[in-house]
Amino acid sequence: MKRFVITFAAIFGLVALWSAGWVYFAHQVDDGIAALALGDPAITCASHSVGGYPFRFDVTCTGATISEGDIVLTLPEWRGTALAYQPSHILVFAKSPAHLSDAFLGSERQISWDNLEASLRLNGNRLERLSVIADTFELDNALFGMSRMAATDHAEFHLVDAAAPEDAKGRMTIAAYFTAKALTTSLPDLPPVDTSLDAYIGAMPDDIDLWTMPDLLAGWQAAGGEVVVNAIKLDAADGSDRHLSATGHIGLSPQGTPEGTLTLNSHGLADIAKSMAPNLGPLIIGPTEDDGSSKQVLHFDNATLHVGIVPLLTFNPLF
């Protein structure tokens, strides 16, 4: 009997200790949500709650608003959840639709989806992996009525710690991946395309709290930051042999303007390029060979995008 009483008391004590710890950290989470309203961007909730006792922390935010300057994003609801014994892995789910407005440009967009979820893994303040997955993702111009701008059956975006051995102290290399199936746009001559991106972003701060700092890009440039594009691919989703790919590298000059090169290889796009932009289209994809293939090199330097010696665009400094 005495052993039973001792065992019961020990279990009761552990449960009480765990419960007290859960309540304490739930208050910390609640305070953290309130502090988001003071951040940049500012994140507010019309109402929010913290639940999930005893083994999870579940946060529900209804009437969510994310704002920075003139740009405002509203969501009906987002939910975040993490296991109490694994708080560095956070899952987030969002309800559709979202509305994005820019008061300066006078634009209004509606973003809708059937399913949208994100997963964030951290090692301390260092990113291990960020994944965002969406099904039936649609972007509409909502300023006057509703007009479709872009849509895809399925899209995924991933950022992964590449743990490159050449990374300097306090810096990290991030592998970036993006895919979109049967992507359609409002461009009338562009067929649905399967799109993918495979790239590395070097010399990023290894503390994600620094990613929102105003001097992020200046510090990234000073550290030798560069985006290495292993492959950007656009393949016609109708099974035809029309495709475009790009490889190269882009960084920033000390003045904050893009510098680097992108090499484009394409096939079967001469007619589409000409119909979309009669003067610039053929110039951008390059001369077309007898087999329908084209190649062109784009140069970013002196705040200008060049094709050969022909300037196409100029850029304002990013910092």
Image (tube, helix red, strand yellow):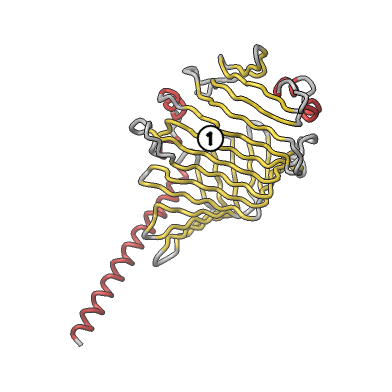
Q: Looking at the figure, which quarter contains the N terminus?
A: bottom left
| Residue found at x 53% / y 35% | 199
Q: Residue 293 in the image: state x and y as whole percent.
A: 73, 27
According to the image, label 1 marks what residue?
A: 199
Residue placed most toward the observer, 230 or 210: 230
Residue placed most toward the observer, 220 or 50: 220
Q: Taking 234 as reference, is 91 left or right?
A: left
Query: Mark 1, residues whose alpha carbon is within 10 Å: few (<14), some, or many (≥20)?
Result: many
Residue placed most toward the observer, 78 or 175: 175
Q: Residue 175 in the image: state x and y as whole percent.
A: 49, 38
Which residue ends up furthest to the left in the rendered image?
2
Q: Taking 218 as reference, is 293 left or right?
A: right
| Residue found at x 58% / y 29% | 247
Looking at numbered disc 1 in the image, what kind of residue is underneath it? Ala
Q: Is residue 109 visible?
A: yes
Q: Residue 311 in the image: state x and y as whole percent.
A: 66, 14
Q: Taking 177 as reference, is 6 left or right?
A: left
Q: Quadrant of residue 282?
A: top right
**Figure label count:** 1
Q: Residue 136 in the image: state x and y as whole percent.
A: 68, 51
Q: Quadrant of residue 243?
A: top right
Looking at the image, residue 196 lies above or below residue 313:
below
Helix, strand or loop at mark 1: strand
Looking at the image, residue 39 lies above or below residue 121:
above
Which residue ends up furthest to the top in the rendered image?
309
